[in-house]
Image (tube, rainbow, N blue to C red):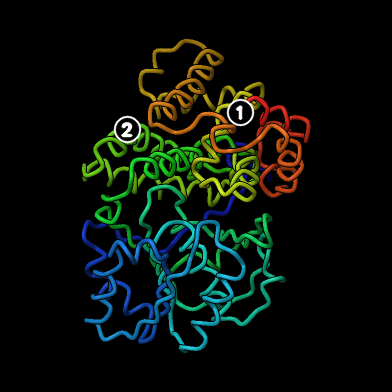
Amino acid sequence: MTNDAFPPFAFNTTPSVRFEAGAARRFGAIAGPILGARILFVTDPGLRALGLCDAALASLEEAGIAVTIFDRVEADPSLATLTAAVETGRAAGVTGVAGFGGGSSLDVAKLAALLTGSGEDLDAAWGVGNAKGPRLPLALVPTTAGTGSEVTPVSIITVGEEEKRGVSSPLILPDIAVLDPELTLGLPPAITAATGIDAMVHAIEAYASKSANNNPLSKMLARQALQLLGAHIETAVFAGHDMAARSAMLLGSMLAGQAFANSPVAAVHALAYPIGGTFHVPHGLSNALVLPHVLRFNAPEAAGLYAEIAADAFPELAHEDGTQGRCGSFIEALAALSKKLGLPAQLREVGIGEEHLAKMAADAMKQTRLLVNNPRELREADALAIYRAAW
């Protein structure tokens, strides 16, 4: 017997989430029992230089845990970086892995835990559901409010000069995510803005995803995420030490992560990847640059869905009459928000020439795992038209 109202779906998320201001200072007590006596601590050089890791590292030392630090993660982490992290962990005989930082550090930590624990061949693990495991115990601590990587079963690695490949498997969900809004207080306005828009994109694309696994839980989480993010992103950008705003952004980012982890993202991300992979534009900004243009393209198929969530992000749109009008106002409000937050609005502003657009469109079409979720079928000519509109 079929149930058209509630078709079958699967929902997986991180089994334990700890949200607490100051939690990083107690990281040893919180995560030590899970990770064991010897851990690989994965982070980036910027966070080390800022001292943002110090409290967590001190708490691990106080708990009597031997820590091997790998702090060489870069933006859009490379296969070479991942390989080095795995080799470092194996050489130290670690019993668990902690990822501390933005999405790049968390992604490296996920695969370091998998490959160190299982010894499997990464080439066989790429794609959806191909990882075999087992992995080492894993704890993730986000320091930005954007990727939601602490609750997503996906890790993205840059292979070669430009290609991004992903491992998608519930196996790489961590055992625990530790969310400490104090860690985000010092984020610069530009990073706060770009990562915040990234989180909003996650919620929007999850809600409208054509995935067969789009489900009531993801939709509920996406709407709650948009309410938190929309209400607090400006304060977080312009008054960065506002703890309430930072807390709302970190929680909203996680909720959006839970949503898109189970109802996957689509063409905004597919078109953002060539911008980041080729031109090394930060991921959140790459999304922001194409967001309104992709939504306008999708509107003939997705206007009703966008209209449903418009007032979650922008409460003033609740008074907008008509599906088409509310959808249009939602898209314009998102474009205006990016501009108000100080983000570049056009591809040319981040050093992309018009002559690059055709190759970017061809590269975007390689993101088949994302494009299949888009509410409207998108061909290479459409991708090129969207890039031209964004240029």
**Residue 86: % across, % down:** 54, 78
Q: Position of residue 206 (x, y in %)?
A: 54, 41
The residue shown at (59%, 81%) is 118
Give the quarter of the image for residue 54: bottom left
Using the numbered discs, state the Cα–Cα distance from disc 1 to disc 2 in whole angstroms: 23 Å
Quarter of the figure that contains the N terminus: top right
Q: Residues within 10 Å of mark 1 (few under 14, many from 20)?
A: some
Left or right: residue 315 versus residue 24 is: right
Residue at image coords 35%, 60%: 17
Kindly identify which numbered label has been placed on residue 26. none
Q: Residue at x 26, y 40 (%)?
A: 245
Q: Quadrant of the C terminus?
A: top right
Q: Amino acid at mark 1?
A: Ala
Of the two numbered discs 1 and 2 in the rendering, the one whose residue sits closer to the viewer: 1
Q: Earlier in the sequence, mark 1 or mark 2?
A: 2
Which amino acid, mark 2? Answer: Glu
Tell me if residue 227 comes above or below residue 323 in the rendering.
below
Circle 1 residue: 390
Q: Position of residue 91 (x, y in %)?
A: 50, 88
Left or right: 79 with respect to 62?
Answer: right
Residue 187 percent location from the top left of the image: 32, 49
Q: Tell me whether the residue at label 1 lies in contact with that at label 2, contact meaning CB atoms closer than 8 angstroms.
A: no
Q: Assign a secondary structure to mark 2.
A: helix
User: Pointer 2: what residue?
Assistant: 234
